[in-house]
Image (cartoon, rainbow, N blue to C red):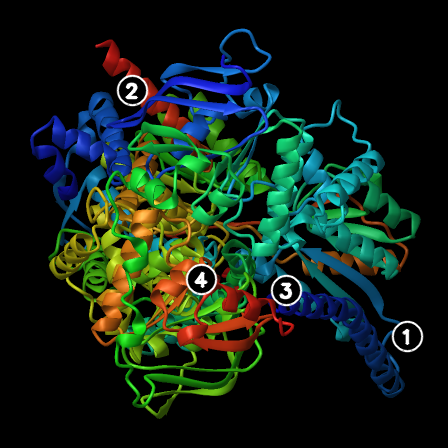
Amino acid sequence: MQEGAVLEMRGICKYFPGVKALQHVDFTLREGEIHALMGENGAGKSTLIKVLTGVYEKDGGEIYIKGHQKAVTIKSPQDAQNVGISTVYQEITLCPNLTVAENMYIGRTKGSFANWKQMNEGAAELLRALGIPASPTQQLGSCSIAVQQMVAIARAVDMDCKVLILDEPTSSLDEQEVAKLFTLMKDLRMKGVGIIFVTHFLDQVYEVCDRITVLRDGQLEGEYPIAQLPRVQLVSKMLGKELDDMASIRNDGEDKKMDTGTPVLEAKQLSSAAGIKPFDFSIRKGEVNGFTGLLGSGRSECVRAIFGADRKTSGTVSMDGKQVKINKPLDAMKLGIGYLPEDRKRDGIVGDLSVRDNIILALQVMKGFFKPISRAQAEAFADEYIKLLEIKTASSETPIKQLSGGNQQKVILARWLLTNPRYLILDEPTRGIDVGTKVEIQKLVLKLASEGKSVTFISSEIDEMLRTCSRLVVMRDRKVVGELTGEDLNQTKIMSTIAGGGN
Amino acid sequence: MTKLETPTKKTLGTRMKELVRQQIFIPIAALLILVVFNLIVDPSFFAITLGQNNNGDPVLSGYLITILNNASELVILAIGMTLVTSASGGQDISVGATIAIAGSVMLRVLCGDQVRPETMQAPIIVAFLAGCVVAMLFGAFNGTLVAYFKIQPMVATLIMFTAGRSIAAWINNNTLPIVNDPVFAYFGNFIPGIPIPTPVFIAIACMIVIALVLKFTTLGLYTQSVGINSHSSRLNGIDPAFVKFLTYVILGLCVAVAALIKVSRISTINYSVIAKDIEMDAILAVALGGNALSGGKFNMAASILGAYVIQFLTTTLYKFNVASDALPAYKAVVVIILVVMSAPVVREKLSKLWKARKEAK
Amino acid sequence: MKKLIALLLALVMVMALAACGTSAPAETTAAAAAEGTTAAPAETEAAEAPAELIKVGIINNDPNESGYRTANDADLKRVFCEENGYDASFAYSLKNDEQIAAAQKFIQDEVDYLLLSAAGTSGWDTVLQDAQDAGIQVILFDRTIDADEGLYVASVVSDTYKEGQIAVDWLVEQGLEEYNVIHIQGVMGSSAQLGRSDALTKKCEEDENWNMVTQQTAEWNAENAQQIVQAVIDSGKEFNVIYAENDDMAKGAVAALDAAGITHGVDGDVIIMGFDCNKWALEEVLAGNWNFDGQCNPFQADTINEIIQGLEAGNAPAEKVIYLEETYFDAATITQEDVDTYGI
């Protein structure tokens, strides 16, 4: 083993039927470092993590852990835990109906009797130390997703681990929470814990990591100290090709002539049962605008209100100056509005249905119950969009749940493009998908706008918003607190508007 | 039977592999096992003879005819049950009781106030339509509980399961009306001159209707989509509650058709035993068709085939003189095998075993 | 929001249940009180009427169970009414535990007599002991139970073994060369099944000329009977007697024969035997489609009434077990009058 290394993986191979998921991958984690594991979806990151945590059995290679003379065998998550490897997954894997403390200690108590008092005290102390706003006796399900995530990390940390794997831990956290998490990670680094950090957010990688390992197509691309790998290069390594400079996606919007006629859609004093304060909103032909704000600030609720996804409690909506009634999603769809929801798994895909059925779903519903799209026609539509959006799928018959996140998102996008909407709402279309697809989606948004469609684009990554939107509606605490255009469209201004308080 | 031939006739090898992976393979395999078993034990099982019934009309008889005949109600119910299962992720356990109700309504209309009228008091079609309306109303009741009050299907339909037979008895004031007109018996027996039992035709008609409905409406896509992910469905303009509601109403219609056959078979009704335990067979048919009882994707043809397999099993057991009160135990064995086989753990193990065997070769 | 609605719904249901629970007895007592007050002036007008009504609690099986039970229930209601000096309450269930609960309630209500047709034979000792301690006289009807004889005054039942014997005796009289019998049984273990099966089973074992083609339970169900007979027909086995333990099953069996073109009844190839004397069944016998229908007498109320009147007068019944008179009907001798009198 190398000096200072806490974990070494050598020549790891993993095969699935017909796929070489990992081919001779090396990975080294040193004591007290935060190490980013990067790669597009399908590059092998998750497989490597799953081999390391014993979810999959490796087909070749060795794993060395500090303190063990020989290579260790990890055949189950329990084995991994025993050698000091702890994992926090993107999706919460705790029990929402147990208390916070119970979740932190579950499966770890010795014997069959638990000392509840001691357990609660220990949990309280740890929560306080990590600054997690939760009470040990609170039911986990009553905490926000972010807090649940942090509890999961607290649990992992408390297990006295040498290697901590954080698999997309930040995707459901807002910035303050991310900052808190980073503080926590840095603390752990000081204590000598090696942290493997898997994320899609480039900003975060550069904010907190010491080293980056890049995987591509199941193979090791390379390992780099962070200072030696600028962002653009990282992206090109991940994609395996030189990328157009991402900043140049959008020609400075100002030179485009803004349509100044009647707005395509205009909402006045709209509010919904989801609890947003009444807001005004409008969008013009060919415009791309966006909602920004912290997670939970009401961005999604606003667009859901426009689409009729939540029950409207007040306000009016008009299209082309004429007042319209949107009480349910179908009303909005018939008026030419499309909505790609934030939570892809819950609200977007219909998992067991084929890619084809998922693509035609919205169009089919609009056509009506008694006018089914013929098999041949559906096939044609599906093929057209699979080609157009370069959706990677075995066939149009494949159930959508078997696709990677980015390709699922493309299918949902195809679904709405097929309805040929005048106004398309994209709520976090780039979340949890690889960089290449992110860029493609951003390009597509601008292309749609140039064709005269209107698009509302929501993203947690302000960079993306700046590249695509010509106007940003800023939200805080379920209220619209500002609208930024032109010169105001820059990171600092947005931040200060989000933060509020006049600074 | 014809369903069977098309896939097996084609070349083996790859075709066979393809078939094994398909959902409809489960009922086909079950059917094949039963067929082979009967062939070995007693090939005369498959004999069909043309004879005459007591009215001097030609009729076909034999175990196969018996199976096709007696499976009819089950097939019709399986159609509705498949849709209900797909959309609501649960089953309607009240179909037996609502058959009693629908049958009771039909007899009430046919007999009027009399218990044994000399002539029917209303045309059969009126009685049938009345039965349809009532059965669909009860379906709507179940559907409302499930779709709008979000009660678990089994729990919601438990109400009618418990109360249904009493309601059926109440409709006819606890009397047992009997229809004397031979025309009414046509639906459950034979039409003079046609040697094939009428229920077989009714079942085929129902299959054709559901095939057309699935082809010319989006019912299939909507129910599956709602069953898989009702949130997504709603955001794509589908009204999930209404789709669930609709499937229960459709099941109500299926119940009415099955009830017509049931009461016509013996021209009367016994509220406490008519269509007893048929709900379990209908659910079993859906499961045997390889459909997930938790809803989502469905294969209608597989469900229908599943219904025939169950009747095949029942008739086989009768042939071997298995006491009819022991039948549920045998069916339970089938259920256990099915459930175990479809459990992900077992499937994984099996595919591993399969792989190991292949490699060994 | 959804949770709130669910909670509300649950609350409403609980309240409705509670309301049912409390208001129902209240109503009955109110009704009873009302009856009492209306009865009082009636008494003064008709001086011969008994001063006090005899309070009876009657526990029976669900009248929807069969035509037999419907007739039985109607008969009890006819006899135990106010005009005859009774204040009767009825409880119905097909489940033993519910029946026991009903019995306990009647004991609390301090009835004078408890009439019981038990769903199951066991588990009655404790509650009947309670009744005895409370000074309540218990009369069993229709079904016997496994309990100490001292716990009840009398039981008024059908002798199902005798029913079976009558039927077999009748069958022997038909003098067939060979008897190939399809025996369709009721729910296994029920007293009617045990009794009606007994004589036939023995006869088939003893006599070489008597063959049991198949012996199967159809659980009193016509459809099952039809399937059983269908299976025999399909198998090509010979048979000339169908012995069904109730009318419904006989009807199902006949449906299978009709479809297969096998004649039955008088001058037919197959002898049809049923039980219970449903009106429609007797009509079949009258028309010659069936040959035999054995009676299972549901009219026990008059006999019970006599016992109670005797007890009121201080005379215990002469015998503990009182068997009802039962007869049978033969297609050769049945008349329309029989149908009208005995049909249920």
User: In this rendering, would A371 be left or right of C315?
Assistant: left
Decide: few, some or many residues near mark 3? Use Cα within 10 Å; few <14, some 14-19, many ≥20. Answer: few
Foreground residue among B331 and B58 = B331
Quarter of the image that includes the N terminus of chain C: bottom right
Name the chain letter of the residue that bears numbered label 4: B
Q: Work out how far the residue at label 4 is from the one at label 1, CA to CA, in angstroms.
A: 48 Å
Tag 2–tag 1 contact (CB < 8 Å): no
Q: Which mark is residue C105?
A: none
Please check whether the numbered discs 2 and 3 fall on a single chain: no
Taking the spot 54% from the left edge, 25% from the top edge, the residue there is: A77
Between label 4 and label 2, give the one nearer the viewer. 2
Residue on which disc 1 sits: C51
Observer able to see residue A53: yes
Q: Residue at x 20, y 66 (%)?
A: A372
Q: CA distance from mark 3 to mark 4?
A: 31 Å
Which label is found at residue B354?
Answer: 2
Q: Are marks 2 and 3 in contact (CB under 8 Å)?
A: no
Mark 2 against mark 1, which lies toward the viewer?
A: 2
Q: Amino acid at mark 4?
A: Thr
Q: Relative to C237, does residue C344 appear above or below in the rendering?
A: below
